[in-house]
Amino acid sequence: ATRDPDYRHPYGYERLRYVFTDRSSLILLGVGGILPLIHGIQTLVSHDEPNLSSAWVMGGLFLVVGVLETPALIRSYHALRTTSKRARMSFMKYLSNGNDIINITTFVECALGVLAAGAGVASSFQYWITGDPIYDSIASVIMATSVVAGSSLLLTKNTRALVGETLPVEFVEYLIFTLEEDDIVNSVHDVKTEVLGLDTVRFKAEIEFNAEAITRKIKNLYNIPSPESAQLLEQMRGLGCEEGAEDWVMRNNAMYQTALSSELQRIEDILKRHLAEAHFKNFYIDLELW
């Protein structure tokens, strides 16, 4: 996913993150959700003699799993806290809408592992005390329910990301407002954005420029009368023939075209600055004339 863009993949390989996490979520759903549910149902309908020695073994295994999962859970939690603050979102909102899919997947899977380990240790202890297999069934149902909920969250996030997800609506509206506040810009149309992975974004829009404002900027005609307007009048009075008039028009059109290209680049730089403040590193900006 961190490979550089190439000819066949001009926007890079960021979406591979979602492919791998999607497969991981499917495996989690099957192994951690469906299998414990089947085990819980089988335990409820069967009437096997209690095996108290297995309770100690299962309790020990669950305890080891909980100890191993906890450090990764803490690390991913702190990473998500930092990223959510940068995105100016609450932790829970970022968990649902954030684009740091690797840390989100790690956090959810580790949280489910710790929860399942806690339920397994508690059920094993109660099973050993009472000899009643109902506690094993309850733990299996708790594990299955939590894993199905967590993996469903991850699968939903991955689906949205693979299909293509836009920037937050509030942020897009803020960018449009910022551009339209510029004296050179009349309006912004047909805005399309797409987040590609953790730090890459596409931004497409059509810009209606203020032709009069650009012309005044080229000729510095902010006040009339002024030395600049007097100079312009003198140039026009000096057009003594059709060839001179044609040359004057061509030169001014060329100046306008150059100025328009400069304004497009300046607007693009404004967008890049605001996207960088939102902690994006790679920008694919496509601005067209409206």
Image: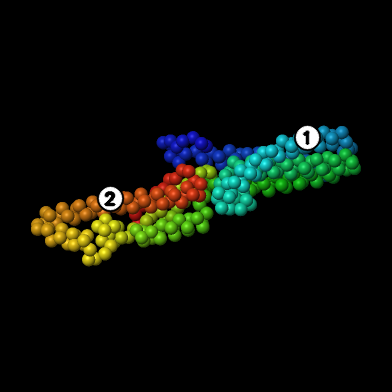
Element marked by disc 2: helix
Residue 206: numbered disc: none
The residue at which mark 2 appears reads as: 258
Q: Nearer the viewer, residue 205 or 175?
A: 175
Residue 211 visible in the current orientation: no
Q: Which residue shows up at 43% across the image and 58% down it?
A: 178
Label 1 crowd (10 A; few <14 / some 14-19 / many >=20) = some
Residue 143 position by quadrant: top right
Which residue sits furthest front? 227
Task: Identify whether 193 is placed above or below 231.
Answer: above
Task: Identify whether 3 is placed above or below 269.
Answer: above
* CA–CA distance in space, label 2 to label 1: 71 Å
Picture coordinates of residue 1, whole percent (x, y)? 52, 37
Picture coordinates of residue 114, whole percent (x, y)? 73, 42
Which residue sits furthest bottom? 225
Picture coordinates of residue 86, whole percent (x, y)? 55, 49
The residue at which mark 1 appears reads as: 61
Element marked by disc 1: helix
Q: Nearer the viewer, residue 48 or 177?
A: 177
Q: Which residue shows up at 15% across the image and 58% down it?
A: 235
Colour pattern of the rendering: rainbow
Label 2 crowd (10 A; few <14 / some 14-19 / many >=20) = few
Q: Closer to the N terminus: mark 2 or mark 1?
A: 1
Three-letter residue code for mark 1: Leu
Q: Quadrant of the C terminus?
A: bottom left
Three-letter residue code for mark 2: Thr
Q: Which residue shows up at 86% across the image and 43% down it?
A: 126
Task: Identify whether 171 is placed above or below 17.
Answer: below
Residue 5 position by quadrant: top left
